Image: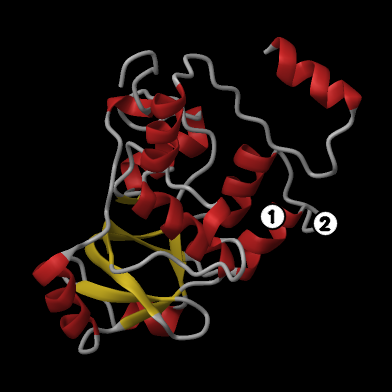
Amino acid sequence: MTGLGQPYGGTLIDLLATGASREEIGREAATLPSIEMDSRHTSDFELLANGGFSPLDGFMGEADYRSVVDQMTLANGLPWPVPVTLAVSEPEAARLATGGRAALRDDSGFVLGVIDITEIYKRDKKEEAKKVYRTDDEAHPGVAAMYAGGDTIVAGKVTALSLPSHDGMAERRLTPAQTRAEFGKLGWKTVVGFQTRNPIHRAHEYLIKVA
């Protein structure tokens, strides 16, 4: 797209199945062992599926996981600060196998997609907490959420059947491909991303304008 930089990592990922393939995977998903994702995993799934986590095409294998925890890069050297992993409980792990496939469900039981399992490995939560969050104190929300999850990680390529629903906000949630198309339509060549935890104030306005 003229005027815009390349997607991070060079490739904009889209993991949404369409047409006959989507219908076939949907039927198969009903017969597969299931992994129930919590809200954090579901958010990660959405960003994998729509390309927000490009160039990742699934939940991280052990080589990428170890590299991110130790060096804040993927195994290929691309900067990446926080692991994108799918932690499961021991009962769930017992039903899964490397080389198999599992259905990915949200916390209401709705099937969002499937994962083709390439690896199943263990993580050291305390080490991950100290290296990623620089603390193992459960007062940190990221640490608390990680400790609440399983010790076993399932890795593999994701295929999405649909994106999570966001009642009342769908029109404000554009995928990376949609935002890039909109930027191109508007002729924008400089785009600033800004995330805030509170209403924007004048200092924020200044930073955005001078970025």
Mark 2 and mark 1: Cα distance apart in space: 8 Å
- The C terminus appears in which quarter of the rendering? top right
What residue sits right under mark 1 in the picture?
Answer: 143
Q: Is residue 6 above or below residue 174?
A: above
Q: Position of residue 193 (x, y in %)?
A: 60, 29
Seen at 74% across and 44% down, the residue is 135
Left of 200 or right of it: where is 169? left
Indicate the colouring scheme: secondary structure
Q: Would residue 99 be seen by someone viewing this image from the given angle? A: no
Q: Position of residue 92 (x, y in %)?
A: 39, 81
Q: Residues within 10 Å of mark 1 (few under 14, many from 20)?
A: many
Residue 7, located in which quarter of the rendered image?
top left
Q: Position of residue 111 (x, y in %)?
A: 36, 79
Q: Is residue 177 above or below residue 129?
A: above
- The N terminus appears in which quarter of the rendering? top left
Circles 2 and 1 in contact, beta carbons < 8 Å: yes
Q: Would residue 117 be seen by someone viewing this image from the given angle? A: yes
Seen at 47% across and 72% down, the residue is 37
Seen at 20% across and 66% down, the residue is 98
**Outermost residue toward the right in this view:** 202
Q: Is residue 181 above or below residue 170?
A: above
Left of 150 or right of it: where is 35? left
Disc number for residue 139 = 2
Q: Could you tell me the amino acid type at mark 1? A: Val
Q: Is residue 75 above or below residue 60?
A: above
Left of 78 or right of it: where is 18? left
Along the viewing direction, whichever of 142 and 16 lies nearer the viewer = 16
Along the viewing direction, whichever of 177 and 48 lies nearer the viewer = 177
